[in-house]
Amino acid sequence: MPQFIDTRALNDDARNVAAREAALQQVSWPQNLAPPTVSYVSHGHVAIVGPADATRRAARQLAESELASVTLIATQDDDDEASDLANTHYIACDAPRLEGYLGAFRMTAGENGPLLSKATIGRDHFDAVLDLGASPLMHYELPPPGYHRVTHATPLDQAIQDLQACIGEFEKPRYFQIESDLCAHAGRGQSGCTRCLDICPADAISSVKQEIVIDPFRCHGAGSCTSVCPTGAIRYALPTPESLDDYIARLLASYQAEGGDTAVVRFLDQETQASETTEAAGHVLDVPLEELGAAGLDHWLGALARGAAEVRIVMHDALPTSLAHLVRDQHAQAITMLESLGHDPRRLSLIDAGDIAIRDALPILPPLGERLETKRPHAKREALNAILDFLAAHGTPRETRVAMPAGAPFGTLDIDTDNCTLCMACVAVCPTQALSSPGQSPALNFQESACVQCGLCETACPEQVIALHPGFMAAPETRNHVATVKEEAPFECIGCGKPFATASTIASIKQKLADHPYFAGDAIKRLEMCEDCRVKDIWHDMARDPNAQLKV
C-alpha cells in the first residue's frame, strides 16, 4: 500500500469540490438509451434439491406462495413422500445434474439420465432451483439467474423470498459485443489465446468450433473477459470502451478548467459508491462502473495520460475470486509498465473499500505536464499503444525488455531464421498483423507493439521455428518498429520464369518429398514449377505415354 503525504494544507478542498461539481454538471455519464437486452420467462415451476427433510421444511415455507409447482428432489431419501404438502411433487435422486438458467433449467438423473422435470411435472425444464445440498450442483462463482443456494451470505429465508419473486418475464442488458475477426483464440485449425475462457466467473464463455461464444443468459456482466481480452474482440457495452475513455478525458479537462487541481481518478463499482456514507474529498473524481472488471489497465493508464495525478482502484470483499485475481494481475502488469516507462508506480494503486483516509489522501505527485488529447481509437491494442507512446514521451523509458506477470499479452518472438522457409503460415493466422509480408518479395515482418502473445504463430509454424518471448519493451522506437525478420529472393519457375515461392521453401519441400513415388526421377523437377507449369508437364507426360493416366 503506498504511503501518502498529507499536503491538504497546500490544497484548497472547497475549490476542488466546486470544480468537481461543475465538471459533473458539464460531463454526463455515458448512457446507452436503448441497450440490447436478453429476456427470461419463468412460470414459477420450482425444484428444491437436497436431503428430504430439508427440502420439506423449505417447501412448507412456500405453501402460501403463488408458485405454479414445487418439486422436491431428495438426494437423501427417508421414504416420506411429502403427501401433506399441496401442489408438491416428490422424487428421489442421489446424483442429479443441473444446467441452464432462469426459466430453462434442465435437471437429469445422473449424466445423460432422464429429465426429472418430465418425470414429475411433465415439462422439459424447471424455472428456478433451490439447492440445499452439502455440495453445490453448480460450481460457479457467479451462478446463473434462477439458481439459489443457501449460504452464510444468503440464509434460507432470503432464498425463499427470492424464489417467490421468480414468476414473470425479466430482462437484463446484453453486456458485451463480440468482433470475431479480432479474436486471437483460433485460426485455420490452430488454437491460441484462451484468456477469456480461463477468467469468466460465470462459466458463460465456451469455444464452439474454435470460435468464442458467450451465453448471454448466463453472463453476469462482470467484465473480466473484456479486460483480459488483448485485442478487444470482446467489448463491454455499458458503456463502450470509447465512451468510458471519453468520459474520463472530458471530466478531467472540465475539472481542471474549473480550477481543480491534483485530480485522483477512482475506479469503483456502483454498489460500492452507493454504500459510502461520506462524500469523497474534492480532488477525487469517481468512475462508477457497472462492474469493476468493465475497465482495465488501458483505462487506468489512460486516465494518467488524460491528466490524473493518480488512479485508485477500489477492491471489496464481495468481488468474485477470479475477478479480484484479474484486477490484481492487471494492476501488476500496469505498474510494471509504468516503471519501465519511467514513471512512479505509486501513481496507480489498489485500495480497500471503506478506507476513507486512503480514499481522500492527496496524491504524492502532480499530474504529468501535458494531457493526451486525441480520441481513443476503436481497436484496443491501438488505443493502448497510443497511451504507452504518450507515457514514454513524458517519461524515461528503459531500452531493455522487462519481465511481466505470467500470461501478460506483451512480448516479441524468437524466430530461427536459418530454418524459416517463409511459408507464411504464421502470417495467415496472426489476428493482429504483428506478423506480415510486404507482398513485393518473399519477406517476413514483425511489429512487437501489435503482438498479443496468443501463440497461434507458434502452433501453426510447420517448421517449428517460432517461440514466444514474453516481456514488455518500453522504448517506442523498438516496440513500434516494423522489423524485417527474414527476406529472400523469389524462386522462379523453371518452366515460365514466374516467381512463385522462395528457394528455402522449394528446398524444404523437395527434401520432404524426395522418396515419394509421384516425384521419382525427372518428376522431382515439377516441384520447381509453378502450379500452371506443373499441370502442363503432367499432361505432356500423359500424351507421350497414355498408360501414365493409370498412375494419376
Image (cartoon, rainbow, N blue to C red):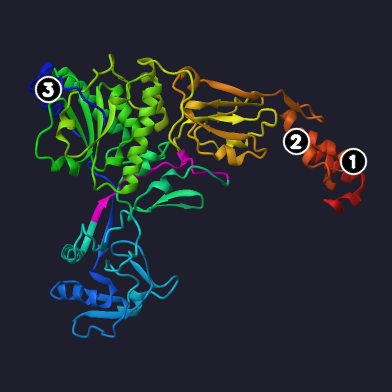
- Tell me which label, 3 or 2, sits earlier in the chain: 3
Query: What number of labels is visible?
Result: 3
Dot 1 crowding, Cα within 10 Å, few <14, some 14–19, many 20+: few
Q: Position of residue 12 (x, y in %)?
A: 10, 19
Does residue 466 appear left or right of residue 248 in this picture?
Answer: right
Residue 106 pos. (x, y %): 36, 68
Q: Position of residue 33 (x, y in %)?
A: 22, 41
Q: Amino acid at mark 1?
A: Gly
Sequence-first disc among 3 and 1: 3
For badge 3, the amino acid type reads Asn
Q: Nearer the viewer, residue 138 or 525?
A: 138
Residue that mark 2 sits on: 508
Disc 3 to disc 2, C-alpha distance: 69 Å
Residues packed near mark 2 inside 10 Å, few (<14), some (14 to 19) or many (20 plus): some
Q: Which mark is residue 521?
A: 1
Q: Mark 1 or mark 2: which comes first in sequence?
A: 2
The quarter holding residue 489 reads: top right
Any part of residue 78 in sight: yes
The amino acid type of the residue labelled 2 equals: Ser
- The residue at which mark 3 appears reads as 16
Q: How dense is the environment of label 3, judged by Cα within 10 Å: few (below 14), some, or many (20 and up)? A: many
Q: Check disc 3 and report its element: helix, strand or loop.
A: helix
